Amino acid sequence: MGEFFGSIWWLLVTLGLLVTFHEYGHYWVARRCGVKVLRFSIGFGRPLWTRIGRDGTEYVVAAIPLGGYVRMLDEREGEVPAAELDQAFNRKPVGQRIAIVAAGPAANILFAVAAFWLMFVVGKPDYLPVVGEPTGIAAEAGLREGDRIAAIGDTPVSTWTDGTIALVTAVLARRDLPLQVVAPDGGERVLQIPFSRLDRGLDEREALQALGIRARTPVAPAVVGRALPDRPGARAGVRDGDLILSVNGRPVETFAGLYEAIQVEAAKSPELELAVRRDGSLLTLRATAERGTGSDGQPNFQLGLAQGDTRDTVLRYGPLAAIPAAVGETWRMTATTVAFLGHMALGRASLDNVAGPIGIAQTANTSASLGVAWFLSFLAIMSLSIGILNLLPIPILDGGHLLYYLIEVVKGSPVSERALVAGQYVGLALLAGLMGLAFYNDILRLLP
């Protein structure tokens, strides 16, 4: 599946799952509270598929898959027959209305716990949090190459992903934290990292570079993870799992060395002779390198050979142990997401992090390509993000409705119609601005 179609497919899978769970939360609680649900729609716009259920609800899959809604019987949206007034949403006690509205974000949080649980049971491949050659503030604090990060502040670190999230959080807060590390010889020590020394004018990416903590580059043998179809290597007969020993007699020991050998030898002549070991046998294959462009934008020679998996640890728990681990991960990622939103609101985090459908599609495709566990992690984080964003006190979002109902609880009467209409306009303006920023960032990502 190509990157374009793969991105579209995984975007549809992601939004389909998360929107369905969110809206089902509203639907399920509404039915338990005796509210009549008129329509359960996944997507907006022209219906592509409809069905009337036994409960009288119209189930719809619509053309624009960027959300969904549950439409309930409500006197504010049309005339309600006298016999059905007791099933109208607006006639229900404020406590039930709060429960119905909060059920959508709650369903997203429950989905995240389930996704994290399954991720831990399947096992998530990752890199050990071993540091490469440090620079800047980290080097001055005493961090050394080969040190393994065990904890950042009170946050334990078991993988490089954990470490990155904790580092970004500390960088954004500019708060000094202890760094617990384990040296290659097993010795433990605690370093005080002065995150507060980082220039507050730097965004999180620039600040991380100034901090000077980076992952150790794993030394990988020249084993082909994938010979891309219809590329020079595959046409020459290179297969997945082949070990490349030399290029034109030039010995190759690592995958990085293979890349360098291809550049040097292809610059002399694109006709290359590869010595390959496959299943204990030695083979000689001849390939013609093609000119291309590397990820850094520089021209290079390519055979279409992808590196194999170099991840050196797997984050895995048994089914029972995965339950508290999933709850803990959900709590940690919720706190991180809320803190990150706060940093963006205060201007400490870059607004470039706001992604629209294109950015989500690309991330979904990348996560899926890394394996089931990584895609489950992506789904869990996306589900949490949807739940948290919907709880923001913005009119037309769930959080805005909850704010109205809390005001109703305090003052003893519903918010006035005038205030509701004004809130709708404010909410639409805020959402339009947010979506505009997301699409703007998406377009910038597509530009060279």
Image: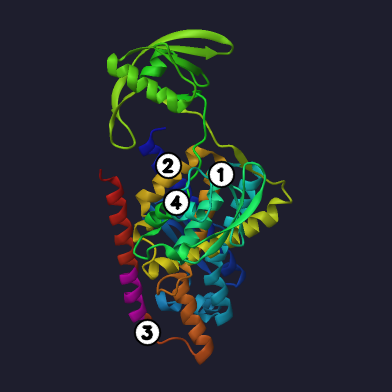
- In the displayed structure, 266 sits above or below 318; it is above
Q: What amino acid is labelled 4 in the image?
A: Gly
Helix, strand or loop: magenta stretch: helix
| Residue 71 visible to the viewer | no
Precedes in sequence: disc 1 or disc 2: 2
Q: Is residue 431 above or below residue 316?
A: below
Residue at label 4? 212
In the image, what residue type sits under mark 3? Ala
Image position of 278 with respect to 418: above or below = above
**Disc number at residue 130?**
1
Mark sitting earlier along the chain (4/2)? 2
Q: Quadrant of the C terminus?
A: top left
Contact (Cβ within 8 Å) of mark 1 with mark 2: no
Q: CA distance from mark 3 to mark 4?
A: 51 Å
423 is within the stretch colored magenta: yes
Reading the image, the residue beneath label 3 is 419
- What is the distance, in whole Å, between disc 3 and disc 1 at their CAs? 55 Å
Other residues around mark 1 within 10 Å, as few (<14) / some (14–19) / many (≥20): many
The magenta region covers 421-430
Disc number placed over residue 9 in the picture, else none: 2
Q: Does the stretch in magenta take in 64?
A: no
